[in-house]
Amino acid sequence: MGENVIIVGAGLVGCLASLAFAKRGYDVTVFDYRLDPRDSSTEDRNLRSINLAISARGISALEYVDREIAERVLRDVIPMKGRMIHNLQGEQESQIYGLFGECINSIDRAVLNNFLLDELDNAGISVKFGHKLVKVKFGNDKQTCLFSTGEDKVDVVECDFVIGCDGAYSTTRYQMQRAMRMDYAQEYIDSCYIELYIPKAKKFNKQFNGHFSIAPDHLHIWPRHNYMLIALANADGSFTSTFFGPWSLVESLVEDEEKTRRFLLESFPDAMALMGIDEAVRKFISYPKGALMCVECNPYHVDGGKAIILGDAAHSMVPFYGQGMNCGFEDVRVLMQLLDKYRGNRAAAFQRYSETRHEDLVAIIKLAKNNYKEMSHDVTSTSFLVKKQLDRALGRLLRDKWLPLYTMVSFRADVPYHRAVEISEKHRRILNRLMLLFVSTGAIMTALGLARLSRWFRRWM
Amino acid sequence: MGENVIIVGAGLVGCLASLAFAKRGYDVTVFDYRLDPRDSSTEDRNLRSINLAISARGISALEYVDREIAERVLRDVIPMKGRMIHNLQGEQESQIYGLFGECINSIDRAVLNNFLLDELDNAGISVKFGHKLVKVKFGNDKQTCLFSTGEDKVDVVECDFVIGCDGAYSTTRYQMQRAMRMDYAQEYIDSCYIELYIPKAKKFNKQFNGHFSIAPDHLHIWPRHNYMLIALANADGSFTSTFFGPWSLVESLVEDEEKTRRFLLESFPDAMALMGIDEAVRKFISYPKGALMCVECNPYHVDGGKAIILGDAAHSMVPFYGQGMNCGFEDVRVLMQLLDKYRGNRAAAFQRYSETRHEDLVAIIKLAKNNYKEMSHDVTSTSFLVKKQLDRALGRLLRDKWLPLYTMVSFRADVPYHRAVEISEKHRRILNRLMLLFVSTGAIMTALGLARLSRWFRRWM
């Protein structure tokens, strides 16, 4: 084909999309406003990373694009088989994710990004860093992108079509909005996040087979209702930890070092012992505070196959289902499959993508938002846990006929997000009826028992 | 005070805001990307005007800012006391808006805008045309606006604060979004609009006291369920008319002149007789097609009193309640009253504005959206008309104790939009119960009547 495509953004989704289009013979050029993150002289680590958890959808998309790359990525991940809930007393309780040992996989965002950038180099794909997209002009035949490359310097590049993978604050999306009728909504969640850190343990820990001070095969959560701390393991034994809490709480804390210290010690005593309270306080106060924004839009493409947005540019979600990157990778797979189906007819494939992908994206954005409550609060509630056990028991018993929601979202790339939600809604109604049945059966049995007991009493008294 | 303020946009709301701030002693400069519309050499009439209907909220805000200006505006309006429904046979039916003869008032957008611009000149307010806002930098103390004034030319202006009145596609709003966490949603309605025109009648019409070919004191509607035509009178006897219909319908029509002609003749025979079918077809096909977009956001200001958005920039709505400009004018009044309340403390006033204004703006945006169905469809339904008559009867009987929704929105600037919606919801429930009571009473009376009838029969047969 040899049509040339500009991919805006060399983040995770941009890299995967580049590899996928290059494999199909398109002439791919990638532009990113950052400098090359692999260049050790660029210290642009933004101190706002949240470790990623790659699961079935992400893996399946990687494999779809390149089986070998997928294998190499999975070589360095740390499987997590469940959540580890830390209570105020420092006691830990494991809640397993899968029914049959399935895991999600912790990986450092920067490590994965750099790995994929190397793969772009290997594939001979040109990546131009330091190019900030300023404007896109959509023509009848060719699209023109204008990049700023520094004070007063611009680079004007022409292409057949544009793929916007430039994140939640996407310029591609904004430029598309100026050329078409795109419904769009952004909503900020009242929670900020702060990156913290648990250093690797001094001694090798035989139990964990590494310098880990807590179990690396769990996603650690310190749920405290309206705020929480989480931690995901890194390969070297350290953990990348993230605090989530309302802006007003954080703003009132960071004004006062002593208050911050007290808050952290009282809320997360065991975590502070691992982090070192002084380091934790310093980071909590001085590190940048991240905002959490949901983005929804529709459609995702400019008619005529001129442009399309993928990943966070099209569907930014809060990180509480661990699906942001997985969903973005799935975008690439879905688009590529449609391009195959329509034999390279971009106009048709892009339009069909918008028509079919929207309900799935809306579903996962909502699931991710609802999961904040589950992670920070529900995991400590008895009725939640009882229902969850029942759900799991049915899942183990009925196998493919009863898939828990978490399983469908995280371990079954073959179930579209919106179907997962529909199925789980049906299950929820059945579970509620079962619970009611159990409770009333229990009540009847108790009543019968009491009746027998009273007869027995009357006879003998 | 003498603080200087930049007002972005010299449209209707921008002009009123400028007058209001100038009156309070602020140093006001207005910037607009257009050339001066009063300059006869600028032919930038965009052929997408919808005539405006100014009603209580707009008038009250005008009066609040300047009683004399309000009087002069009202001198040239054409009062409309109701809707005139045109059916397919060309029969007309009047539906009166107010209970006691209240009117909304037709006015040409360009006439009103030019009048207000003249008032700005009279007040010595500097208006810089041909200045397109490109960037706003929010500082600790001063805000810096960068305007493009033509190919490669820029104008950098500093001020204490910025008022964005730059419409639905506001650049001020976009610049604010880059500096703060603003929830934002834009949604396109599946309707496009096309401006059409009924020329003034050749003969003076005694009945209408002017060269009008249909009643000037009504807003004319040709409701055809999923599309419609409307017309509002101009002072010279002509009518500005607007067609609204789904994009797919319009796109399929404009491809084929003959099809368009047939469609217009069959849908609006009496209107075509007034417009001239050839002219109508020409305009329908060649005039620009306008999109209808709803915009909601929150908050409306940048902390510290640095900036605020008013009018369509903050709340673009569809035109079906005739409240877009009225609501924008009311924004100005509400903001000014808060500035008075907080004695010029902008930070406090802007914040309070966001906190209190949001529920009203959300309410009117939704009302306007729902009114499309009422205008294009419900006005032809019997049960709608019966309920409306009952509503009006109660309104006339109970006066201030029972205000119909349309009355509260259009004729009562003292009832905030969100209260109007709450009250009308309560009324709706009462009306439904009354209807039920009437229907069941009717049934019982009929049953009793039948019973008596049958007794009477038995006795005499």
Image (tube, coloured by chain):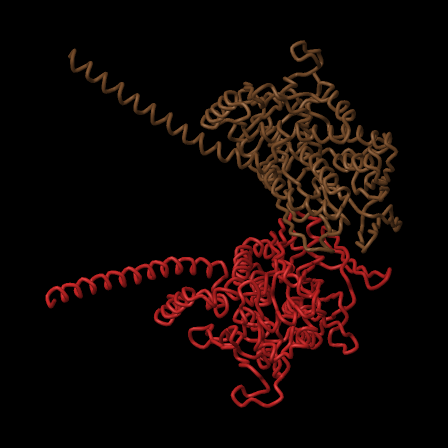
Chain colours: A brown, B red
- Image quarter (top left, top right, bottom left or bottom right) of the C terminus of chain B: bottom left
Residue B411 vertical position relative to residue B217 in the rendered view, above or below: above
Quadrant housing residue A181: bottom right
Q: Residue furthest left?
A: B459
Quadrant housing residue A105: top right
Give the left or right position of residue A409, taking residue B397 as reference. Answer: right
Residue A460 vertical position relative to residue A378 in the rendered view, above or below: above
Residue A30 vertical position relative to residue B358 in the rendered view, above or below: above
Residue A308 at x, y = what percent? 74, 46
Give the left or right position of residue B326, taking residue A290 as reference. Answer: left
Residue A204 at x, y = what percent? 71, 11
Give the left or right position of residue A440, taking residue B115 as reference. Answer: left
Who's the residue at 80% across and 54% down the image?
Answer: A137
Residue B317 vertical position relative to residue A405 in the rendered view, above or below: below
Residue B258 at x, y = what percent? 68, 70
Q: How many marks?
A: 0
The answer to whether any part of residue B22 appears in the image is: no
The answer to whether any part of residue A25 appears in the image is: yes
Who's the residue at 86% across and 42% down the image?
Answer: A2
Residue A441 at x, y = what percent? 34, 24
Give the camera-side residue of A366 and B214. Answer: B214
Give the camera-side residue of B156 and A110. Answer: A110
Q: Residue furthest top?
A: A206
Give the left or right position of residue A441, taking residue A19 as reference. Answer: left
- Image quarter (top left, top right, bottom left or bottom right) of the N terminus of chain B: bottom right
Quadrant housing residue B228: bottom right
